Image (tube, rainbow, N blue to C red):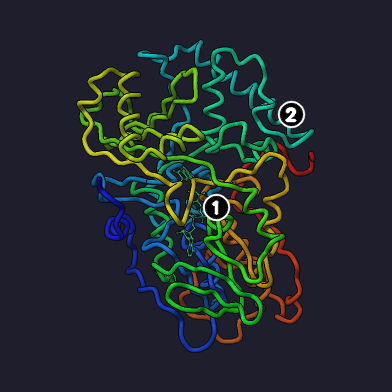
């Protein structure tokens, strides 16, 4: 089975290379202003903000590549393969689109979807029934969330008929990586409606990698602990790093499982991480030679199912022979635990059931992700445990003296997305800049104008005791189904 290599990822980012990547360096001569832990979307966004402000920062990344859960693999199939994030939601306001090096690589994604009922597609009237059942279910959860934070499953209307399993798959595992029984109605209702989307031809991960070029990033350097008792010290496998402040962007599951320790222990603060566990979402990618499904480029297909053993198809991805069979939620987690071979078998059997046994003969190269087993991710993206409604807001606060958290989990409406992680990284960087005050030495020329902090920095002494950071002006507007004022 092919594996993700540093070479394949470099090739993906090279697709964008507008200027040569700088070697990651540890700035020398004095302590760092900021150490950023993790080079995913949040870490990259924070680093760009700090670089633009002329701050001395270093990003340390556990793996041998940047991107985290948004990464494009170029070698497994010889065409861009987004192992994680693929959909660029709300492109009109998505911060990554605004600064994409080559706008011509971005193209709109159709939001229409097909539904397979056995060996045929749903007819117009059936599709209308399906969409209407989805709307009723969504509305029921939104209504429930106005009264209490319960599991979405408890709010499901009784009249979903034979569309129930399909609606439950789409609203739970497919959209949020969790079964509705494990999904908070409040989190669901606050999530921005994903009413438009785009794709990036060389891959979403390749776009993110291009945006990381020129930043000071040290790869293959897992952090093991952050000690804030005296000088803020981050312990890594390669030695200690001292900085004035830290931005932690490590996925919640990694922190909750003790993969990154805080000294002193953040007993009170650790709780939010445990209450934001990552759901399960994996991608079984198959090269289907000769378009045996007869689908168009980037067609999205669901199955009308009567149980949870189902998946979503994204066909002929980016006009290539690549077909994604995405599995998620409890079923996806159980399947992934059985290993890649079992996942690929499932996808082949399932597709054969929907399109005929000949599909199997068309399968060329294949690969299945297993995000729950990736030690520096341990899952797909966060979803609040029912009853923990305010937990994301706690992560907007400082999590310890001079330590901020950023990442998809720290966004109240765009959680679980790259755009949300990016905004969260920028917001944490703005808070850090306010805490640090003005730069004393002249700023390096590398600053990038579009990433200038929006807040005027105040003197360091005055900022020292600022307990929270406020939300930066929103640049990426999703529309939460329940606005804060309504609650
Ligand atoms: C299969 C899948 C499909 C998805 N689809 C979409 C989609 O279509 N659209 C969308 O917008 N979002 C999607 N998402 C979600 C999206 O990928 C994430 O929300 C986003 O990438 C998270 O960014 P982040 O910076 O918060 O975290 P991450 O990307 O996880 O970055 C954290 C970084 O920290 C590093 N790290 C972890 N521990 C340590 C340590 N101890 N020391 C140093 N470094 C460490 C990790 O290696 C990682 O690079 C998908 C996710 C998955 C898994």
Considering only vertical position in the picture, is 154 above or below 88?
A: above
State the quadrant of the C terminus: top right
Determine whether, in the image, residue 104 is placed left or right of residue 446: left
Q: Work out whether residue 41 or residue 311 is closer to the camera in this orientation and state it.
A: 311
Please provide percent x and percent y for residue 473: 67, 57
Could you say which quadrant of the image residue 317 lies in? Answer: top left
Q: Residue at x 55, y 70 (%)?
A: 225
Q: Which mark is residue 253?
A: 1
Query: How far apart are the alpha carbons under marks 1 and 2?
Result: 30 Å
Local crowd size for mark 2, using a 10 Å CA cut-off: few (<14), some (14–19), many (≥20) = some
Instruction: Name the residue: 34% across, 31% down.
Output: 315
Tag in front: 1 or 2: 1
Percent x, y for residue 333?
46, 38
- The part of the image, by quadrant, that contains residue 406 is bottom right
Q: Tell me, yes or no, if residue 249 can be seen here.
A: yes
Where residue 288 appears, as percent x and y from the top left, is 25, 31
Identify which residue, 485 or 262, lies in the foreground.
Answer: 262
Dot 2: element: helix
Instruction: Using the image, determine if residue 14 lies above or below residue 34.
Output: above
């Amino acid at each position: 089975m092919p594996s993700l290599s540093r070479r394949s990822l470099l090739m993906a980012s090279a697709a964008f290379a507008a200027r040569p990547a700088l070697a990651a360096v540890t700035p020398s001569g004095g302590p760092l202003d900021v150490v950023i832990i993790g080079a995913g979307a949040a870490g990259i966004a924070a680093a760009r903000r700090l670089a633009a402000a002329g701050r001395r920062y270093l990003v340390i990344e556990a793996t041998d590549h940047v991107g985290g859960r948004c990464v494009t693999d170029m070698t497994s199939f010889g065409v861009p393969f987004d192992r994680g994030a693929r959909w660029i939601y709300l492109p009109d306001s998505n911060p990554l689109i605004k600064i994409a090096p080559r706008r011509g690589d971005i193209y709109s994604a159709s939001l229409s979807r097909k539904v397979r009922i056995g060996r045929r597609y749903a007819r117009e009237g059936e599709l209308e029934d399906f969409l209407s059942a989805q709307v009723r279910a969504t509305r029921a959860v939104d209504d429930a969330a106005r009264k209490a934070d319960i599991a979405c499953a408890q709010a499901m209307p009784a009249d979903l008929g034979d569309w129930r399993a399909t609606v439950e798959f789409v609203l739970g595992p497919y959209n949020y990586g969790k079964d509705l029984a494990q999904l908070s109605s409040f989190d669901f209702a606050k999530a921005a409606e994903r009413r438009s989307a785009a794709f990036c031809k060389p891959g979403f991960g390749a776009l993110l990698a291009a945006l990381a070029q020129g930043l000071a990033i040290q790869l293959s350097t897992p952090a093991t602990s952050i000690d804030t008792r005296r000088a803020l010290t981050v312990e890594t496998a390669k030695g200690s790093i001292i900085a004035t402040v830290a931005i932690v962007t490590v996925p919640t599951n990694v922190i909750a499982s003790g993969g990154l320790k805080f000294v002193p222990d953040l007993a009170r603060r650790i709780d939010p991480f445990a209450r934001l566990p990552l759901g399960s979402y994996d991608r079984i990618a198959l090269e289907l030679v000769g378009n045996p499904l007869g689908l168009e480029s980037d067609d999205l297909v669901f199955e009308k199912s009567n149980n949870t053993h189902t998946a979503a198809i994204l066909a002929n991805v980016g006009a290539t022979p690549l077909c994604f069979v995405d599995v998620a939620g409890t079923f996806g987690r159980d399947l992934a635990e059985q290993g890649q071979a079992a996942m690929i078998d499932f996808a082949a059997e399932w597709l054969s059931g929907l399109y005929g046994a000949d599909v199997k003969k068309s399968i060329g190269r294949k690969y299945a992700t297993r995000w729950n087993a990736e030690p520096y991710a341990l899952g797909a993206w966060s979803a609040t445990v029912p009853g923990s409604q305010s937990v994301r807001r706690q992560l907007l606060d400082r999590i310890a003296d001079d330590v901020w958290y950023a990442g998809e989990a720290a966004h109240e409406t765009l959680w679980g997305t790259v755009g949300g992680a990016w905004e969260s990284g920028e917001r944490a960087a703005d808070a850090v800049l306010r805490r640090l005050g003005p730069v004393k030495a002249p700023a390096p020329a590398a600053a990038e104008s579009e990433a200038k902090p929006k807040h005027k920095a105040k003197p360091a002494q005055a900022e020292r005791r600022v307990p929270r950071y406020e939300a930066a002006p929103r640049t990426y507007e999703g529309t939460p189904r329940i606005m804060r004022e309504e609650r």
